[in-house]
Each structure stands twice: as C-alpha cells, then as structure tokens.
Amino acid sequence: MEKLALLGGTPVIEKEPEELFRWPIMTEEDYDAAMEVIRENKFSGTDITEKFQDEFAAWQGSKYALAFCNGTMALTAAMFAVGLGHGDEIICPTKTYWGSVSQAINFGASPVFCNINENLSMDPNDLERSITPRTKAIMVVHYYAYPCDMDAIMAIAKKHGLKVIEDVSHAQGGLYKGKRLGTFGDAAAMSMMSWKSFAAGELGMLTTDDRRIFERAMAFGHYERNNENYIRESDDLKDYFSIALGGVKGRANQVCTAIARVQLKYYDERCRRIREAMNYFWDRMEGLPGVRAIRVDESTGSNMAGWYSPHGIYKPEELDGLSVRRFCEALRAEGYRGAWEGGNFCLHTHPFFKTFDLRREGVPSRIVFNDRDVRLDDDKCRPSEDIMCFSVPWFKYLDKEWIDRYVALFRKVIENHEPLLGNDLDKRQGGRWYGFTN
C-alpha cells in the first residue's frame, strides 16, 4: 500500500502547472480594446455595448441581446420582463447560486424549489410536483455546464402555460441536441464575471426572441439614453422611458463589453480545447470506485460548453463510507489544491428563504403575498442527502502528461483510502457532507 501524503507520504504533485489552468486567456487584443475605452472615456457609453449585443445575439441564435452590469441584474430583469409579480411562484432547482432566484421576493413572488438529479440538474420528474395555480415561471439552471433536459422541461411548461427563463451562467455557448442553451425558453440570462467560462470582467447578458420581453428588460434597468430608441411595441412603457422602472441602473460598463467582443471571437475554439481535455481526464478516470463524471454524451449533439467549474459525483459507499470531505482533504495533500466538497448550498435550507423579512411586514418576504406557505414544500426537496459532489481540475487544454498525473493523484487516494477511515470525523454521518461552498 502506497503511503498517502496526508499521512506522511510524498505528494504526487509538488507544484501545479499554472499555465494549464490560466483563465481567462487575455491577449494584447483584449488589453487594446479595454484601453481604447479608457483613453476615449467611453465607460458609460453604449456604442461598444450595442455592437457586442448584436454580435452575441447572432452568435447565440437569438433575436435580441441586452447587456447588464452583472448576471444577477440580468436575471432580475428577466423576471420583470416575463411579468413576475405579487403572489406568483417561480420554480428553481434548489442547488444553484442564490442569484438565480432570491430576487424574486423583490417582485412579491415566492421561490419554490424542486429536486435535482444525479447530474446536479433540474429533475423534470420532480418539476410537476412543484407546480400550483400560482406558478408563473420556471428558472432553469444549466448547473456546472450540464445541459438540462429541455425537451421534458419545455413540454411541462407548455402543458401548464408557464414562462421559462434559462440561467446560462455556467454554460454560455453550450448545446442541447445541437441547439444553443439559452434559446429554448422565453428568455435567458447569464453572468460573464471574471471566473466564468465566458469571462469579461463583471458583465451580464439577457437574450430573447420576444420583442416585448426585450423591451421590458430594457425598461427595467436602462433609461433614456437607449430606451427611447428601442421601445416600439410596448405602449404601456413609453411614458416612462426616462427612468429605469426597477429603480436601479443596470447598464454595462464598456470596458467589459469591449473585452467581451474580443473574447467572443475565440470562445468556441477555447471551449473546444477545454472539452477535449476534460473528456480525456474523465475517460482516464473511468472505472475508479467512488467517483463518477458529470458529463453529457456528446454524440447526442449536446455538450458541456466551457465546462465551467467541473465536478464529479462522489459515492462514499464504494470507498467504505469515506466522507467526501476527508476524500478531498487527501486530494489536496497530494497536490490538487482545488479539491473541495459540495458546491453551492441547497437554497431551501437557508434562513433567507425561511425567515427573512425584507420590508418589515411581519411575514417572511418569501411568502408575504402568497395564500399558502411554500416553505412547507421544502420538506419534499432533499437532493443533497444522497447526491454528493466534489470539484475536479478545470483543464484549459489537452496536456496528456499533466492530466495523467492528476489521474494518478486521484487513483492513489482511491486505491489507498483505507488508512483515511480511522480518523474520518465525518464517517459517522455515513460519508455524507453538506458543503456550504460556492
């Protein structure tokens, strides 16, 4: 038995290769685009942003695109644009970033959570359980770049007459059966902040094929310097064009949209290289006990976009109940310092959705305008008890020698895991660990 580094052995990797993980890829073309904005003092203009919007819409295959200062703001505008209001309910998978749905309370609406499946993706089999006469919309999240089952979800939405918003923050440019993610629902919104696979500093985008949704999103967070020229079909909005209807300014900074224009030119090819590397990694990991890939079958025409924040599923029962936290601790000791358990915490467990009273109304804001207590539904949403995940290296290009070393690192921990059991403080929970990491 090989001695693990955590127990005094020699690490598999002494120093990780920075170049293999460097992201985003920035070149002189990016720097020149940003400096042009700075030199010309165009931070708060719209000319560069409008060019990016047109280019992005054409690239994605949507009629309209609208840039915002960040992804949370874009998602908020999408909620307003589809008409979310007092007493409405919006369904969202529980395992996602809070920005996918928490702002629904600003519209007097109630977030309702559904389960995820073993790919950490919205479970269509649980979606219909969450639908009531008050349901207005479904927030689909392509979590960790895995494409949701859009055929099933859209069929359910059509059956019940529901609006669909796609949160594509983890999966810009991804495909589901040959079609771009973000082109299935009524609207899509996404983050392009500096850690995402499409990284442009701090930026959000909203896309849609519906002119009225586009105009409502424009009216919500933008104002007279572009509204007057864009609002053509929404007569009920024309009187208000000089003020952002959400009371907030969501316009993008043009340093970010200038960088985004450059990033878009190379994005598909860079994502292809990432997918090549990540698929090689998981192919080499195939058959190891305790771990399963979260990845799509690309032969179906679907893909994982830029494979943002890649994760695997952990099976403690295959490693004698070794907890995922202890497993990741051992991986870090062997040299993979990005090994962490969990992912985003399950939103239905957080006090924000239990007791928070935003406007001091004496009632939790999540249910203040609803005639039922949606918090009672949370007892039916328990996805993380049996579904555990852990992070894996996010390789940016194929380097077989280095990737094989990471595979060897995982293999070493898995094949020599037994000595870890004796001091596993979480093993008493059956190997379960409820991570509250982002």
Image: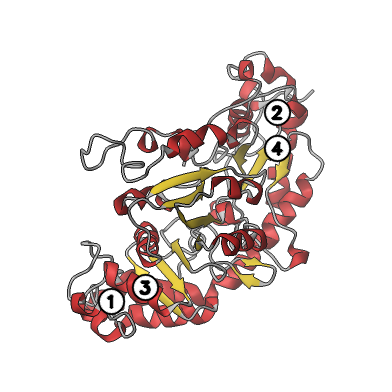
Q: Which of marks 1 and 4 is nearer the N terminus?
A: 1
Q: Which marked residue is nearer to the observer: mark 2 or mark 4?
A: 2
Residue at 64%, 51% (x, y): give it: 124
Amino acid bearing label 2: Pro
The residue wearing badge 3 is: 257
Residue named by callout 1: 37
Instruction: Answer above or below: position of 366 versus 424.
Output: below
Q: Is residue 348 left or right of residue 43?
A: right
Residue 90, percent from left and from top: 45, 52
- Amino acid identity at mark 3: Thr
Q: In this view, does 241 lie to the left or right of 376?
A: left
Look at discs 1 and 3 and give the one toward the viewer.
Answer: 3
Mark positioned earlier in the residue sequence (2 or 4):
2
Q: Element type at marker 4?
A: helix
Mark 3 is surrounded, within 10 Å at the Cα level, by few (under 14), some (14 to 19) or many (20 or more) other residues, namely many
Residue marked by disc 2: 316
Asked if residue 327 lies left or right of residue 98, the reply is right
- Residue at (50% x, 49% y) in the render: 132
Dot 3: element: helix
Amino acid type at circle 1 is Val
